[in-house]
Amino acid sequence: MKITKPLFLAFFLPTVAMSAAEPGWPQFRGPDGSGVAAGAEPPAHFGTSSNVLWAVAIPSGNSSPCIAGDKIILTARDKTQLETLCLDRRDGKILWRQPVPVGKLEPAHPLNTPATPTPVTDGRSVFVYFGSFGLLAYDLDGREQWRRPLPAPVVEFGTGASPILADDKLVQVCDQDEGSHLLAVDKANGKTIWKIERPEFRRSFATPFLWRHDGVEELIVPGSIWLKSYQLKDGAEQWTFSGTSRVACSSPAAGDGLLFSASWNIGGDEGARITMPLFEEFARDHDKNQNGKLSPDEIPAGPVRERFTQMDVNKDGLVTAAEWAGMRDMFAKAGNAVLAIRPGGQGDITATHLAWKVTRSLPYVSSPLFHQGRVFTVKNGGLASCYEAKTGKPFYQDERLGALGDYYSSAVAAGGKIFLASQKGVVLVLASGEKLEILARNDLGEQIMATPAIVGGKMYVRTAGHLYAFGR
């Protein structure tokens, strides 16, 4: 079925008034960043002409739907313009759009866009982050409340981490190849509450997670090689777990008293680890002009040269001995795994608070999902795994979903169903249980990078060119 911009589908169902008490989807992965919706389940079977309430063409972007009451907020790129969009949840009508005052767009990976971080809302205001500009706040009618310009990230792949809210603080992680830091600003005015430098961290794209347990709150921030916990009050570091992947792409989850984190990147698997010689040894044979630095053409083709831009921290086109040593150290320390971590840690908890660990069938970007006592993950290629949350016992592992390709969207759940979208545009629906049961494969015919949102038995899916609402 062809959908033309800006027309809506001619057959969407009658709209129904929505209760103000109805749960929303306030941030990336919904309530508390859990990926789990309260209330009714969406239908298992849907498509461009089945159980579709409405569909509307929207500009490109990878940000996921953020929902407050009857409003859906997204970020988008319309040609050279970045903007924040607000749509009516009842019929998909665009209520307002606010352009972002960007002088120059940040560079981005071909699969990324300058409109990837997901907005976050407290039900009164909505907050957005663009690497090309910084932070902005609007009320739900689209009136700008404040703006906080920030330096463009020092990474050629663009930004990925979404802002989150914690009490009166808006938190944004800015991990990059140089100048990494964690920032908390006052959500009322955008002024700095605290800023923590993270010089040991390189590029990462994972959204932080607020871990609530035992009457406390911890700000969990995945990063290169380390997973760290910070105090919300002042940003003080509480604990560190070392041995995660070189680049963090997925957000943690929590349940049954444990924290779950998944990370994978090339060069971190045992048996396939990338190693680098000492700079002095390598330069002796390859530094052709003997200037003590390496250019791309002085490094033989292979996995090391492919990561030249990651080694080149200051982006001057040359790799120094210090930059080489930094990447060598990262390759040596990196680890790929799904981790379960016990609470109560202080300092280095690598050897003391690991509850269980899995090093097989690891997700890359798609975040782990905790639901009904189980942890669910999906590996690129369409391979699903499910574990008992308390013990790590596999219920199933490396099971084929029948939908090939990569998975950048994260799984979400409602009731007894798990929903998962492949990059190729197939939304799979699984029964939440100890055996893999595929209830439906729904092909929307367009690329999907964003994570779906679920509110009140309806599911909202962003594809490459449209936003869909599905329900009965």
Image (spheres, grey):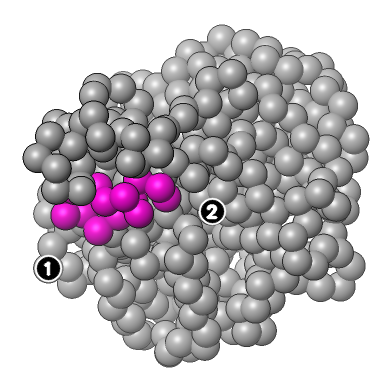
Q: Is residue 131 above or below residue 8?
A: below
Q: Residue at x 37, y 58 (%)?
A: 176
Q: Is residue 124 above or below residue 375?
A: below
Question: In the figure, is residue 164 to the left or right of 277?
Answer: right
- Residue type beneath disc 2: Gly
Residue depth check, mark 1 versus mark 2: number of the one nearer the observer: 2
Examine the structure image and report whether residue 318 is included in the region drawn in magenta. Answer: yes
Q: Position of residue 420 (x, y in %)?
A: 57, 30
Rendering quarter of residue 122: bottom right
Q: Quadrant of residue 189?
A: bottom left
Task: Quadrant for the C terminus, please.
Answer: top right
Residue 190, percent from left and from top: 42, 85
Residue at the far left: name it: 289
Front-most of residues 415 and 232? 232
Residue for badge 1: 103
Quick check: 232 above or below 274?
below
Q: Position of residue 415 (x, y in %)?
A: 77, 39
- The tag earlier along the polypeptide, 1 or 2, is 1
User: Mark 1: few, some, or many residues within 10 Å (few <14, many ≥20)?
Assistant: few
User: In this view of the protein, which residue sits in the foreground, 290 or 364?
Assistant: 290
In the rendered structure, does residue 90 fall within the stretch colored magenta? no
Q: Quadrant of the N terminus?
A: top left
Residue behind mark 2: 223
Numbered circles on residues, count: 2
| Side of 383 where 446 appears, left or right | left
Identify the residue shown where x is 18% and y is 37%. 287
Residue 221 coordinates in the image, percent (x, y): 59, 60
Which amino acid, by three-letter code, is at mark 1? Gly
Q: Write the start and end of the magenta stretch as one range.
A: 313-326
